[in-house]
């Protein structure tokens, strides 16, 4: 049972990756990149989701995915044109697939008719096109493509051998309602431990079947490559009522690993092409055992000439050739296969005999492209799936190593340094290596934010539909990498922020038009690296925050004291105030406020901060500042009283020496410090942390820090010890959150130092003053 | 009951008695003896200082580094309202697990491992609020009174109000 659960967990993991991929591919397709690579990727993704779903019995998902896949298949081979309508139907379908996956994962049942409308559309689209095919239009195409085949066939003296003597004209002659299947496995099919026999058994269950192997490609023993594939099969299946899709389904799990040509004899225009083939194959020489040495003697040209009978098999292919010849050329078989491949693949259908192994273009081109892409991928980026716990353990150990290393360095005093130069050099190398190791380990955990960003287009679509607004989402910098744990915590806040922008920021089309703006509002989601931080910005071109309303509500709720007049910026920030948004009455304001305190608390939890800036009538920008990694921080070590504290270096602007006399009082009772003409809020850490004051009234040090929105704050400390790198440890793991403290770290001497939460100190300061 | 599984070789009669008995780590604060169940104790270490935590009550002595993990230390004497301990190198920190957290308790000394009978545990007499809040019960061992510490109660209310 637990095994099955494991498999399921893996399946859902893969699903979420595949769904992400779908979003990406369709973003590109929507933008106009409608090439076969993208379609193939989409098809593969849906196919994999369907395959797993089938294995676990998620029948609703299978049903929908199947219909979708059929449509994609037709799009792929050109029977259904990829119009804008089809694209948006597909995007909708992706959402439905995602919903099905979620439902399967959570065990909730979706409405039984969920997605039925889209499914019907798929079927209609697919069916419509098939009917066209059965009509006159496509026959013409076939005529053009295959006429040479017919000419060639009659005179062809075939060296192509068919072993089975049953394989003669009479039994092979296609009767009405018979299916002709040619199955040519690739090497990969066997590599994935698939067995043609099982496929044949499955086919046999569908109707009366005859299987004939084609052994013509078997080389002399000397040339025999045990891993190569020399055998293909021709199958006649008597099952008139069977659909092509049903046959294809049998081969579903080997899709891409084989060539399958399926044609229904007698009932389609293709039938005309079957007859010459049968005639040719009935020729006595063909039924001989293949003469291996004579095969060896065959030159390419001869092969080409003698491949006549085979050629007609190709005309089984219902698909008109689509891929250009040039493209096929790039998909050559590996050298080891060349001879067999040659024999196998030769197609005289193109007017001159092809000198290279070529394939039935439509049937072969796409799977080949798939292979090529897979191959490319495996060479480009190889990856393994690792339990995050294991990585965490390595990260922790590297953290300890960093601490030990800095401890060793600290304990080398000057006399030792002078005496043991070799040791010093060794320590330097150790420091370097440790740093490198640390960076590499951190990089393991880094992931592009894409995985979160890609969920957002769907959200925006849904929100737009729900609110009746026109909204478009732009994403920038989605390849920016952040620590995995940070990414995991990012999804909720981002969802809230985007929902907020769509719900409250962007106005309805009418009022936008009234304001002289384009009807379609834009939400821009961007990520960029800024020093040791990642900035994630959600920006909209909506109406901005209704400050009057926000301030009034904040006053009513006692968040802002009546006698305080906050600046515009402070008002904007109020939407994150805890308690501001919890009441129902707030949710209908035209400004902001739904669940934004959740954003703040989530972001704080991962050591980040949020800043909002709004321009009336023009829009709002929310900035998330996140640490690159949760594990390591460059800090300045300071002393407050007897206790060591560390201040994140990323927020420090400068440090200076200064006496208490330099501080001035402002009416609120707070103190400020003038730094080059600018008055900066002063926070005395000794006072704030209620430590026994060092009480040296003389000189003190000020660490000037920058917080969100370029607000500066001056932290008063007793001493500045130096800079170093520390590993962040959680206080909450064994204790609880402490106001003004972002966490702890362990210093070289084994003692704990607390990390100052500069932003947190400043905001609580404002609240305290305001209260 | 982890401790019991180690005693498979005991006679049935002793096993029966063991099921009803409880092993305690006893430690002293001044003249008083207190105990905690031995299975909750993770480690006993000498006092080596702690980094003070701002904005917490006086019974929170701060945090220490326990092999890479930050563990808060509670001053039991201060928790009982007797003022902070002035710790020396001879003072002891008993590291215990409370729920899924690890915490340390600063005590004067660890004295003994006691085996007591569950039936002999008495209720804490009503009267002093601190006693009833922080003790699960009282047990007599060799004519000494041993207070059973309620760890959950000890570690709550650590933050300063406001």
Image (cartoon, helix red, strand yellow):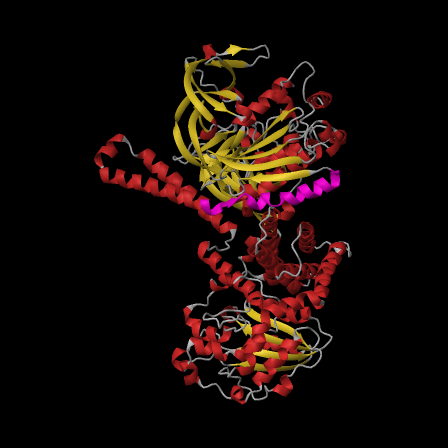
> Residue at left 52%, top 73%?
A347
Q: Report whether A154 appears left or right of A135.
A: left
Q: Nearer the viewer, residue B28 or A303?
A: A303
Residue sticking out furthest to the left: A419
The answer to whether residue B134 is visible is no
- Rendering coords of residue A751 (x, y %): 43, 34
Q: Report whether A621 appears left or right of A219.
A: right
- The quarter of the picture where residue B97 lies is top right
Measured along the vertical axis of the image, is residue B90 above or below residue A196?
above
Measured along the vertical axis of the image, is residue A259 above or below residue A11?
below
Characterize the magenta stretch by its predominant secondary structure: helix
The answer to whether residue A704 is visible is yes
> Residue at left 57%, top 50%?
A33
- Rendering coords of residue A421 (x, y %): 23, 37
Magenta part of the chain: A443-468
Q: Is residue B87 magenta?
A: no
Q: Nearer the viewer, residue A587 or A43?
A: A43
- The quarter of the picture where residue A443 lies is top left
- Quadrant that contains the C terminus of chain A: top right
């Amino acid at each position: 049972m637990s095994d099955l659960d494991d498999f399921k967990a893996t399946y859902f993991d893969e699903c979420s990756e595949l769904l992400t991929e779908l979003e990406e591919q369709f973003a590109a397709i929507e933008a106009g990149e409608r090439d076969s690579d993208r379609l193939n990727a989409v098809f593969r993704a849906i196919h994999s989701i369907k395959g797993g779903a089938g294995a676990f019995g998620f029948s609703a998902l299978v049903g929908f995915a199947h219909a979708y896949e059929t449509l994609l298949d037709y799009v792929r081979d050109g029977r259904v044109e990829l119009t804008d309508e089809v694209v948006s139907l597909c995007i909708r379908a992706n959402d439905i697939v995602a919903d099905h996956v979620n439902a399967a994962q959570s065990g909730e049942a979706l409405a039984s008719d969920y997605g039925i409308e889209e499914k019907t559309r798929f079927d209609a689209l697919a069916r419509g096109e098939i009917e066209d095919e059965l009509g006159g239009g496509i026959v013409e195409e076939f005529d053009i493509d295959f006429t040479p085949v017919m000419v060639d066939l009659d005179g062809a003296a075939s060296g192509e051998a068919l072993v089975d003597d049953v394989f003669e004209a009479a039994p092979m002659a296609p009767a009405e309602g018979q299916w002709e299947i040619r199955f040519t496995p690739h090497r990969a099919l066997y590599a994935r431990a698939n067995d043609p026999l099982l496929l044949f058994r499955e086919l046999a269950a569908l109707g009366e079947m005859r299987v004939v192997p084609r052994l013509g490609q078997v080389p002399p023993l000397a040339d025999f490559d045990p891993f190569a594939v020399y055998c293909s099969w021709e199958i006649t299946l008597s099952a008139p009522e069977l659909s092509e899709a049903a046959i294809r389904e049998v081969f579903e799990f080997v899709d891409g690993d084989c060539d399958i040509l399926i044609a229904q004899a007698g009932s389609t225009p293709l039938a005309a092409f079957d007859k010459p083939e049968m005639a040719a194959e009935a020729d006595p020489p063909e039924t001989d055992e293949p003469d291996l040495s004579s095969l060896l003697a065959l030159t390419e040209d001869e092969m080409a000439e003698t491949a006549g009978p085979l050629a007609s098999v190709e005309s089984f292919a219902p698909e008109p050739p689509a891929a250009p010849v040039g493209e096929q050329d790039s998909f050559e078989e590996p050298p080891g296969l060349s001879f067999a491949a040659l024999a196998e693949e030769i197609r005289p259908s193109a007017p001159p005999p092809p000198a290279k192994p070529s394939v039935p273009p439509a049937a072969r081109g796409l799977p080949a492209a798939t292979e090529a892409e897979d191959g490319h991928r495996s060479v480009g980026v190889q990856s393994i799936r690792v339990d995050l716990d294991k990585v965490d353990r390595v990260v922790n150990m590297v953290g300890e190593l960093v601490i030990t290393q800095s401890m060793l360095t600290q304990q080398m005093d000057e006399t030792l340094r002078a005496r043991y130069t070799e040791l010093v050099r060794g320590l330097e190398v150790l420091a370097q290596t440790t740093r490198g190791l640390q960076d590499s380990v951190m990089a393991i955990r880094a992931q592009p934010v894409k995985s979160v960003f890609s969920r957002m287009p769907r959200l925006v679509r849904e929100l737009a539909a729900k609110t009746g607004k026109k909204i478009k989402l732009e994403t920038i910098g989605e390849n920016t990498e952040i620590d995995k744990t940070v990414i995991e915590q990012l999804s909720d806040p981002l969802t809230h922020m985007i929902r907020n922008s769509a719900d409250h920021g962007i106005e309805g089309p009418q009022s936008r038009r009234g304001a002289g703006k384009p009807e379609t509002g834009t939400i821009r989601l961007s990520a960029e690296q800024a020093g040791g931080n990642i900035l994630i910005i959600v920006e909209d071109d909506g109406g901005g925050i209704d400050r009057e309303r926000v301030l009034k509500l904040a006053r009513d709720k006692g968040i802002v004291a009546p006698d305080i007049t906050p600046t515009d910026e402070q008002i904007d920030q109020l939407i994150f105030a805890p308690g501001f948004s919890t009441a129902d009455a707030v949710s209908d304001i035209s400004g902001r406020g739904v669940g934004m305190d959740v954003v703040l608390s989530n972001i704080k939890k991962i050591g980040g901060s949020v800043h909002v800036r709004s321009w009336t009538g023009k829009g709002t920008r929310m900035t998330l500042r996140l640490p690159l990694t949760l594990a390591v921080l460059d800090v300045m070590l300071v002393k407050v009283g007897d206790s060591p504290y560390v201040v994140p270096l990323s927020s420090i602007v400068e440090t200076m020496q200064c006496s208490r006399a330099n501080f001035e009082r402002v009416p609120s009772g707070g103190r400020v410090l003038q730094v080059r003409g600018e008055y900066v809020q002063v926070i005395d850490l000794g006072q704030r942390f209620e430590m026994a004051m060092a009480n040296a009234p003389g000189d003190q040090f000020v660490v000037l820090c920058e917080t969100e929105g370029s607000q500066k704050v001056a932290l008063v400390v007793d001493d500045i010890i130096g800079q170093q790198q520390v590993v962040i440890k959680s206080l909450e793991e064994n204790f609880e959150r402490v106001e003004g403290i972002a966490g702890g770290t362990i210093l070289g001497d084994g003692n704990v130092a607390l990390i100052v939460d500069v932003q947190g100190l400043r905001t609580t300061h404002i609240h305290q003053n305001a209260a | 009951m982890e401790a019991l599984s180690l005693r498979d070789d005991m006679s049935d009669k002793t096993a029966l008695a063991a099921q009803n008995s409880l092993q305690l780590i006893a430690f002293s604060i001044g003249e008083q003896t207190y105990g905690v169940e031995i299975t909750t104790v993770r480690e006993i270490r000498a006092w080596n200082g702690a980094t003070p935590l701002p904005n917490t009550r006086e019974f929170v002595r701060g945090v220490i580094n326990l092999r890479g993990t930050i563990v808060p230390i509670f001053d039991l004497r201060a928790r009982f309202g007797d003022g902070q301990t002035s710790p020396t190198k001879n003072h002891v920190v008993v590291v215990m697990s409370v729920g899924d957290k690890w915490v340390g308790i600063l005590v004067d000394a660890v004295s003994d491992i006691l085996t007591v009978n569950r039936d002999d545990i008495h209720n804490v007499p009503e009267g002093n609020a601190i006693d009833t809040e922080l003790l699960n019960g009282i047990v007599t061992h060799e004519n000494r009174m041993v207070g059973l510490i309620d760890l959950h109660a000890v570690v709550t209310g650590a933050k300063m109000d406001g």
